[in-house]
Image (tube, helix red, strand yellow):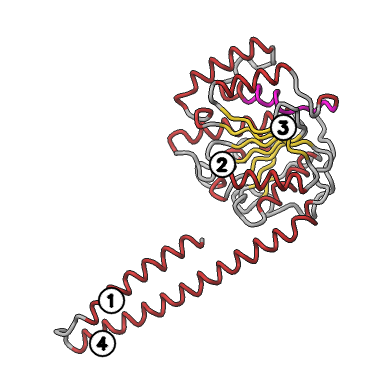
Amino acid sequence: MIDFRYHVVSIVAVFLALATGIVLGSTVLQKPALKTAQGTASSMQQKNADLRRQLLALQQQQRASEGFASASAPTLLANQLSAKRIVVVAAPGADGDQVDSLRKSVKQAGGTVTGTVTLKDGYVQQQQVGVLGGLTDTLAKNTKVAIPADAVPAERAAILLAHAMATRDKTTLGKSDDVGNSILSTFKEAKFLSVDGTPQNHADLAVVVGPTQPYPSKGASASNSAIVALAKQLDVAGSGSVLTAPTPSAGPDGVVAALRGDDDAKKRVSSVDNLDAPAGTVVSILALALDGGGKVGQWGAGTGADGVAPTPTPAPATSKAP
């Protein structure tokens, strides 16, 4: 909203300059024409001033909202993820600062980040489907991970990665195994992802961070399906997952809109469609706590949202039923 108004102000300023030039250079104009031009310039000056005041007010509101969210976070997040292990997955196009903010908020909520997996562009690109298919076929055979015979490459990849990073078995939480290590290292060597930390040390919850802007329309459906499939399989393998992304994600070709349009996925995976809002990170953590406790919700301001944020604040998370 602020960027749009900024551009409006800029455009008005350009027209104001043109109008002023016309007025100053119009020595040959008749008085009625000159008076009209002066009136137009005065009107534009007033509109320009009004827009600048609106822009200033919006900037002040933004700063106030950010300050409130920052000040409220410690209270709202305290112990929400106590004793929980969370793996963070960044989709291609995700904002690094937003990912870092989520990691910090997980710790603020008492949780432990096992690691961060950053998916590369090739993971969602149609031209890489053949390579991904061959890779997942080989891994499925070598690791003996159960995968439906009719699963497409993106679904196979989601099942394999979820198996490597998440678990419902409390005896394996925080521990790695040969199968998970093999899966992650193979995907990494094939340049489908990069790894920070130890995501192979199984987590019980997962946060998937969507792109800042929707994927190009031509391949958006397939790309979104790949991300939604991974968020879903992380929930199946673990105790809960949340897909969170900035505001455009709830619009056309958006990844959150894709999840909410998938009846099966939205019953399992919670979503947040305004990660770029001042309170977006806090809402994402609260959504994860709820989801881990068995309550799936769709949060934000976009189509399909249950509300802006969970109300009241959820109690510390407990295990979700299988």
User: Which badge, 4 or 1, is on the more N-terminal residue?
Assistant: 1
User: Which badge, 2 or 3, is on the more N-terminal residue?
Assistant: 2
Q: Is residue 25 above or below residue 7?
A: below
273 or 138, which lies in front?
138
Instruction: Give the mark toward the camera: 1 or 2.
Output: 2
310 or 23, which lies in front?
23
Q: CA distance from mark 4 to mark 1?
A: 12 Å
Residue labelled with disc 2: 94
Question: Which label was assigned to residue 147?
Answer: none
- Look at the numbered disc 1 and give the secondary structure of its residue: helix
Q: CA distance from mark 2 to mark 3?
A: 20 Å
The crowd level at tag 4 (other Cα within 10 Å; few <14, some 14-19, many 20+) is few
Going by the numbered disc 3, the residue's amino acid type is Asp
Going by the numbered disc 2, the residue's amino acid type is Ala
Going by the numbered disc 1, the residue's amino acid type is Ala
User: Which badge, 1 or 3, is on the more N-terminal residue?
Assistant: 1
Q: What's the residue at 60%, 67% (across, down)?
A: 61
- Residue numbers of the magenta segment: 158-170
Residue labelled with disc 1: 19
Residue labelled with disc 3: 235
Estimate the x, y position of residue 12 in percent, counting from the top left.
37, 70
Query: In the figure, residue 142 lies in which quadrant?
Result: top right
Q: CA distance from mark 1 to mark 2?
A: 43 Å
Q: What's the residue at 69%, 53% (across, down)?
A: 307
Q: Is residue 66 above or below residue 212?
A: below
User: Which badge, 4 or 2, is on the more N-terminal residue?
Assistant: 4
The overriding secondary structure of the stretch rendered in magenta is: helix
Q: Do labels 1 and 2 touch, CB within 8 Å? A: no
Estimate the x, y position of residue 145 in percent, counting from the top left.
69, 15
Identify the image quadrant of the C terminus.
top right
Residue labelled with disc 4: 35
